[in-house]
Amino acid sequence: MSPSKHEHDDAVIRVYSSSATTSQKSCPTYLAAKTDYSVKRLARKKFSRLANMAFSPFNAVLELVENHQVSLDEAFSRLPLRGDTARDIAGELIPPLHEGLLAWTHNAVRNYLRAFEEDHHLQTATGLGSAGPWVRQYPSSDAVVNSRTWELCTWGRGYVYRHGGDTVRELRIPAMGRAGAKRRADAELATAAHVLATGSCVDRDVVDREPGPYRGGKPFPLLPLTSSSHAAALPSRVRLVEIGCIDGLPRVLYDDTAEAAEAFFVSEAADTLSALRRPITEIAGRDCLDCKIRSECRRLYSAPGFLDIRDSSRPRRIWSVTTGRYFSDCPAKAHFRALGLPPDEESEKTAFVRRGDAVHAWLKLLHGRKPRRPCAPGDLPENPDFWSAGEWTLEGEHARHGAAMLAAHLEVCPFLDTAPDSAAYPEQTVAADDKHADVLIVADADLLYRRDGSWVYRELKTTAGGFVADGADLLTWYPQLALAVLLFKAGAIPAGPGSAVELELLTPLGPDIRVVDPNSTSVQERAKDIIHALTRSWHSDEEYLPTPSEKACSRCSYQRWCPVSPRNRPDRSAP
């Protein structure tokens, strides 16, 4: 980060527990800039016409109910709807809600509150009340950290109570769908437990009187531990509980003494958080969407005009082929996906999709080995009737078909004719930034590798059907190939004389390989037409109205939230 961006050296470094978890695709420099409030945006952030943070209205309603003594029906009635202006609710500005988000919010809040009523642990507690937020603040005088004030924070809703002989601080973390659907890393849990065990309670009265400076990076005012407030006293026990907003079921993530929470933090999170102070790498990808210092990034490829759209007035968004496909089906469906609303799992992850995901996961592991080597018969599942890869487990016919697809891959493995030391990146994200449209374009290559000095982009597809017919327009059938061609053309992937865009189609009967030349002018023009057709309407749309059709609705996994679907609507009249 450039020193010129540090406009306020007294601003806090504020780290939420979720930032303690990183992946191979997370950008350390983005995370450091995000948590450092002295780093300011170079351009003013543009706001969407509709709410794009799903949990904001959810939390606003619960704030009114739990801390402002507003009835649930009254709290719901204060949410702004399509056509309204944004409203300040409990100190947070809430833009109008899409009808689908409103449906999810009604469902989620009721399920969250129901989880309290049915929680056997809380039924034996006394003095239950909402509390927090708590913050573990390391003041600037603490030389162990550095000269800046650091704050560790949590996301979720806090409560205090007594249970047996313990004083308990509990953090309830809402999950969009079912509790436990996604594993939370130990570093995230350890950081949250540490904040609950040792943190001080924010003086909400002071913050509510003038919230702006604190949101902008002024250290939070904290209540002394000797305060008469029940929430200020340090606990003897801490609990982290995830609540599924789709079903109201709780899942205990952590429950132990304050002393154990400290040991947990030291062993699982302290080193991860220390690394935030010394970011040394930049990784282009989805983090580039909201990065405050992306204009200085050495990794994000600048591609003005990529989408042939000259309109940067819209809110900054991210686009992928999946976005385009969903929007073509129905704009509302694309919006629900962008919000992260939970889809119907059975229609979203069919047996065929799970099989394809398992095949992808198996090959990702093989292609990530070092030194590089071709996939061989010994790399296939030992039991073709039952095998697992990643989070996917297959059995029976689907397992056998998947194993046959992996066997078919052996004939066309890209490492058959590449040197062992050639660069290869499985599941590689490629990003390009179109400043003219203010859109981040991303593609996830199943494999990006070098062959004879030139980069090759390979897309993997699985099917139980036949091969692609000769003469089929591959770029239309598989827009991922068209996007890859344009990424080569723009320079986001360096094009060499031997560069290629490959489609590897695996079937139980054998493999099929198709090759597209990204250096061909006619191929580039065709790719341009396909991608631009997928992006023009999407870029100009800020309403995301549903466009029902028999074809789109029959396979839509978001019908539960759709305002025009008669099926699976939340029952808002339920108590």
Image: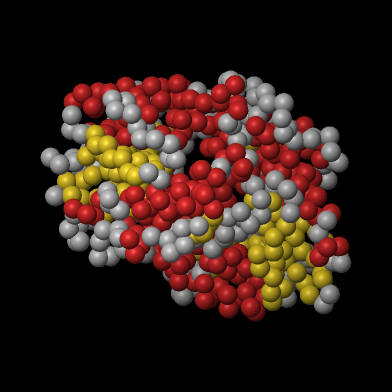
Residue 474 is situated, as x and y percent measured from the top left of the image, at 32, 29
Name the foreground residue: 545 vs 236: 545
Image quarter hosting the C terminus: top right
> What residue is shown at x 77% (from left), y 64% (from top)?
160
Answer with the quarter of the image where residue 157 lies.
bottom right
Q: Is residue 74 above or below residue 211?
A: above
Q: Is residue 435 above or below residue 163?
A: above
Q: Is residue 245 left or right of residue 276?
A: right
Image quarter hosting the N terminus: bottom left
Q: What count of labels does the image hold?
A: 0
Residue 561 is situated, as x and y percent measured from the top left of the image, at 66, 33
* Residue 291, visible in the rendered structure: no
Q: Is residue 357 left or right of residue 4?
A: right
Q: Is residue 149 above or below residue 538?
A: below
Residue 155 is situated, as x and y percent measured from the top left of the image, at 61, 55
Name the foreground residue: 127 vs 172: 172
Question: How does the figure colour the protein chain or chains?
Answer: secondary structure
> What residue is shown at x 56% (from left), y 25% (from top)?
552
> What residue is shown at x 43% (from left), y 64% (from top)?
382
* Residue 530, visible in the rendered structure: yes
Name the foreground residue: 420 vs 538: 420
> What residue is shown at x 78% (from left), y 38% (from top)?
75
Residue 256 is situated, as x and y percent measured from the top left of the image, at 69, 74
